[in-house]
Image (cartoon, helix red, strand yellow):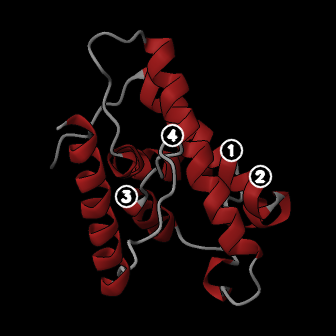
Amino acid sequence: MAKPEIIGDVDKDLVNYIFHKIRLTWGETKYNSTFLDEKTLSDTKRDWAADLIAAMRIRRDRRETEDEFIFRAKDRIDRIFSEIRVLADDGSAKSWEWPSLKKIISYMHKFQIRPSHRIYRSAPVLEDKGKIEGKRKAGAKELGVMKRMFA
């Protein structure tokens, strides 16, 4: 018999937060119809806790405190569920009406935070060769003028 994996208080807090986000995203009715009672909910959390934590792909930095780590992890969860809500609200995405935990874990694992601090630059456009040659000729002409001024 495999030894059950023991998770810490921080992980329990994060798992509870994920289930809280599930309840907020799909509503109390669907949530309560899936997790009928506290024992079912508790067992489900215990069964899926390690997978949920691993899917977040977030590690605690040695320099950050426990509260800083929890804040950073919850921020990641918030961003993930913000995107899931957009998918769930889209009428064409029927698969997000009430997804399984497997689907949520899969989405969490693939999630990438888009860098918001970088300026968007579009793909470079091919320049007109005639324009480049014209600029080169104009530069050579101006260089000749400057050389005559200093010679």
**Residue annotated with mark 4:** 117
N-term-proximal mark, 4 vs 1: 1
Q: Mark 1 and mark 2 in contact (Cβ < 8 Å)?
A: yes
**Residue annotated with mark 1:** 20
Residue 39 visible here: no
N-term-proximal mark, 4 vs 2: 2
Residue 76 visible here: yes
Give how far across and how far down residue 26 sits, in percent.
76, 63
Give how far across and how far down residue 93 sits, in percent.
66, 85
- Identify the amino acid type marked 3: His
Secondary structure under the numbered disc 2 in the rendered image: helix
Residue 109's label in the rendered image is 3
**Residue annotated with mark 2:** 24
Mark 3 closeness class: few <14, some 14–19, many ≥20 residues within 10 Å: some
Distance (Cα) linking label 4 and label 1: 29 Å
Answer with left or right where residue 146 lies relative to residue 23: left
Secondary structure under the numbered disc 1 in the rendered image: helix
